Amino acid sequence: MARGGKRPGAGRPVGSKEKHTLEREARMERVRQRVFEATDNLIDSQMLLAKGMTYVCRVTIGARGGRSDPELVTNEDDSAAYQAEIAQPASPAEQRGALAARRQRLTQNGAR
């Protein structure tokens, strides 16, 4: 009588899978199906995020440097104008001029 070691016919058959492996594969297949069904919506959402702007809000800066509450821009012409302004980067000279104007405005208001 054998007292251990390899026995013929013992163990799981070759190529079969454990129960937890089958459950995990079934869950992954359900996830793949859901992603496949929602592919168009997912791509559209990612494209909107990649473009960077879905909504345009207007914030005004007062004379004393205070900011107003964000106000949603609903007029398409205004929205397009703001987006075009944001898309056009300012030249270095314009950036320096804007920075100098901001510093001057801050010093006049006593912020510094």
Image: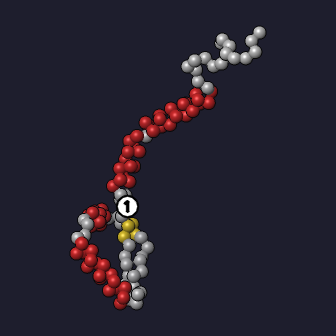
The type of colouring in the image is secondary structure
Residue 15 seen in the current view: yes
Report the amino acid beneath label 1: Tyr
User: Observer-nearest residue: 105 or 66?
Assistant: 105
Residue 10 shows in this picture: no
| Residue drawn at (57%, 18%) of the image | 14
> With respect to residue 43, does 67 lie above or below?
below
Element type at mark 1: loop
Q: Position of residue 66 (x, y in %)?
A: 42, 80
Quarter of the figure with the C terminus: bottom left
Q: Is residue 15 left or right of residue 66?
A: right
In front of the other: 72 or 109: 109
From the top left corner, tell me how far across and down residue 99 is, in percent.
30, 78
Q: Residue at horizontal 54%, vertical 30%?
A: 25
Q: Relative to 98, is 48 above or below?
A: above
Kindly identify which residue carries mark 1. 55
103 shown above or below 27: below
Question: Where residue 84 sits: x, y (%)?
Answer: 26, 64
